[in-house]
Image (spheres, rainbow, N blue to C red):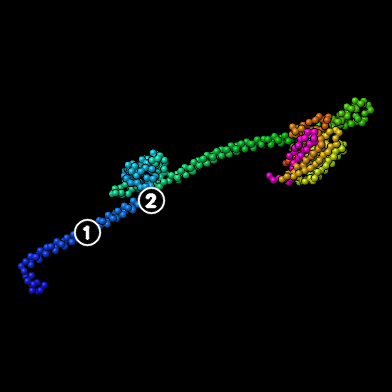
Amino acid sequence: MSDQFLQQYITDPGFTERLESLREWSWVLASTLVLFFLLRRQNTTAWRASEILSERERNFRMLTETIATAIFLHRGGRLCFVNPKAVAYSGYTREELLTMDLWQLVAPEYQEIVKERALARQKGISGAASYEFKIITKQGDDRWLEVTADSIEFEGTPVGLATAYDITQRKLAEQKINLLNAELEHRVIERTTELETANTQLRTSQASIRELNEELQASVQEMQAFSYSVSHDLRAPLRAIQGFTQALQEDYASQLDPAGRDFAQRIVTAANRMDILIQDLLAYSQLSRGELSPKTVSLAKIVAEASAQLQTQIAEHHASISIIGSLPDAFGHRPTLVQVIANLLSNAIKFVASDTPPLVYISAETFENRVRLYVDDNGIGIPAEHAERIFKVFERLHGIETYPGTGIGLAIVRKGIERMGGHAGVMAKENNGSRFWIELPLTRERG
């Protein structure tokens, strides 16, 4: 545009009107632009706030949906929000729970206290607190929860918050432990009672034992007095009878007829038998009350010593005593053991048929820490039903006129062996000999 045209345009009378009109439209446009930018900025802020709120809500949902803790929100007790774990704990659906009050889930014995605490915390009367209670699931099962109760703002209003963990297994374990503790306590009480009873019985038994010991000591004293009496008072007149009868036989035999001499001999025989009986009774009595001091002894020497004591009887009966194999050592009391072996050998020689020479065989065997000595004979044997009877005092299977003896010999055998910690017995074989045996420790037994 030329300067001339521009000058003409500006000086034109309508130019001023057009310029005023343009100014007015420029202000309107500027105002509109400002308003547009203000509205756009406000909308952006609101949009961002909405996005933040939506993101927070998504995070809240994600948190409550995935957390391993049950969450219950309630207004005045009425449930307004529950998460999946709360649904799983209760057994109800989400929809069913949102129509229920919180304490409808709680076991009857806990309902009042849960109701009181829940409402107090929703109103902010007290702070957060933890406690345990039991709920009843939709299926009717008991479930224990450990609950932390508090209050928060939810959707613009204060609500009660309860977060819960399932502690049912722990509670069941506690109940089992309590039951076991109660049972254990009951058993302790029972055992204590039994122990007290046993102690009482023990004290009673100890008192009884003391009384028995006193009676035993008195009996021992009586036995000692009896033994003294037997040894002196009874044997004294017996020796007088023997002496006078012997004098009668020696000094007045010519003045006696055959019947008188026979009577005198019978008196001597009876007196001798009575003397042997008294000696055996004294020996048995001494075994019952005497103190023995066992030690290791040679059975071979014991048998030799016992055989030497019986030389007269062996010669009279033309007996033969043989030792088969070697005889070991044993743990015993030498004098008592000599007496035991001598009694067994004497029995083996005595109880044979009148026309049969006695044959006696001695042998031994060992096992573990024991030795068993056998005395076999070719005698008349013993019926099996009498195998134990013959070891009792004064028990005889035959009359004294057939086989002499006092009936105490085998009783001495058993008593003596038992006093040394051993055993004695017989393997009965009627009419085919007998096998007597004694058993002793090889060495001192620990105990």
- The quadrant of the picture occupied by the N terminus is bottom left
Q: Work out whether mark 1 precedes mark 2 in sequence or the reverse, and give the earlier one.
A: 1
Q: Is residue 230 visible to us here?
A: no
User: What are the residue bounds of the magenta stretch?
Assistant: 423-447
- Identify which residue, 193 or 377, lies in the foreground: 377
Checking the image for residue 328, the label placed there is none
Q: Is residue 308 visible to us here?
A: yes
Vertical side of 124 occupied by 31: above or below: below
Q: Secondary structure at mark 2?
A: loop
Where does the image place residue 154, in percent across and percent down from the top left?
A: 30, 49
Q: CA distance from mark 1 to mark 2?
A: 40 Å
Q: Is residue 429 left or right of residue 355?
A: left
Amino acid type at image mark 1: Arg
Q: Which residue is mark 1?
A: 40
Residue at 83% x, 34% y is 352
Where does the image place residue 425, in percent across and percent down from the top left?
A: 75, 37
Q: Which residue is mark 2?
A: 67
Where does the image place residue 188, in percent across and percent down from the top left?
A: 54, 40
Where does the image place residue 232, in percent across and percent down from the top left?
A: 81, 34
Amino acid type at image mark 2: Ile
Residue 429 included in the magenta stretch of the image: yes
- Identify which residue, 32 or 319, lies in the foreground: 32
